[in-house]
Image: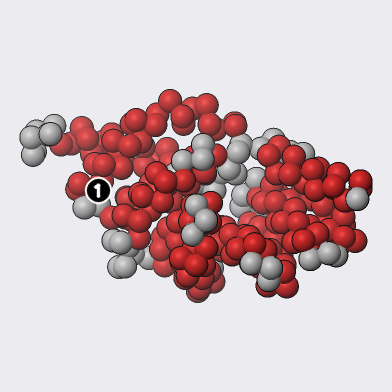
Amino acid sequence: ARVPGRGEHLFDRHAAFFRRLVADLYAAFPGDKSWLGWVAPEENNLRQALEHVLERGDTVALSELCSGLEPFWMTRSQFDEGRRWLDLALAQDGDQPAFLRARNRAAAGGFLVCLGEFDLAARILEEAVGLARACGELFPLEQALQQLGRIWVYQGAFTRAMAAFEEAEQAARALVPSMPQAWLMVGSELCFQGAAAKRAGDWDTAVARFTEATPFLRAPGGGRRLGMLLTELGVIQIT
């Protein structure tokens, strides 16, 4: 345990450094290995920064770190760790700006989907969508709509899922001028539209969406989603 006040400024500087690092990571595309190599070795330092801001009661820093680390935890399938930290952030973000609350909920909902907790995920993601729409925050809007669409596909609500993926695609396209990597998100949403159409039995739409998505996902960072797309197309072609 640290002695209160002794060297505290060093821990503050340490946490501030990793808060800036994570700010650069926010909106990274999960699965893109271009950033993973320089973030992964800092995992213990990132955990120390999280523990420090939690102990200090710096709830804004906690939200920024937790929502910003979502692509890192998601890429490494650290769903339980992501959920645990975001649960702590959500419990303390009531007086924070809407954009931070939207980011927290979009990230938390994604982990809950991966853990199969669809009912809780849907409630949190719908909050994220409402907050993101209200404040015009496009990235968490795209995130939350994608995860809601995934839930609705699993539940067989294909029309709702397609509408969610299409709105997420429009949000991603609107992000491109300020975030060039958003083209990967456009490809991802088109891929999810194709998967939803395939599950609904509309194979013509599925092939059209998968074909449209392919060039976007051939960019660096799109390999995982491209693999999913090519598998789905292959199933259609041999059926």
Identify the residue at image location x=87%, y=60%: 203
Closer-to-camera residue (104/192):
192
Identify the residue at image location x=81%, y=43%: 230
**Render colour scheme:** secondary structure
Label 1 Cα neighbours within 10 Å, binned few <14 / some 14-19 / many ≥20: some
Query: To which quarter of the image does residue 17 belong?
Result: top left
What residue would you read off at disc 1?
A: 54
- Left or right: 199, with 119 as reference point: right
Image quadrant occupied by the N terminus: top left
Question: How many marks on residues?
Answer: 1
Closer-to-camera residue (101/151):
151
Identify the residue at image location x=30%, y=68%: 95
Query: To which quarter of the image does residue 167 belong?
Result: bottom right
Q: Secondary structure at mark 1?
A: helix
Residue 172, image x and y in percent? Answer: 66, 57
Identify the residue at image location x=50%, y=52%: 115
Residue 24 appears in the picture as rendered = no
Closer-to-camera residue (135/125):
125
Residue 46 appears in the picture as rendered = yes
- Left or right: 5, with 119 as reference point: left
Residue 210, image x and y in percent? Answer: 82, 52
- Left or right: 122, with 152 as reference point: left
Instruction: Tell me if residue 138 comes above or below residue 187 in the rendering.
Output: below
Residue 184, image x and y in percent? Answer: 69, 47
Residue 188, image x and y in percent? Answer: 70, 51
Instruction: Tell me if residue 131 comes above or below residue 108 in the rendering.
Output: below
- Left or right: 210, with 131 as reference point: right
Going by the numbered disc 1, the residue's amino acid type is: Leu
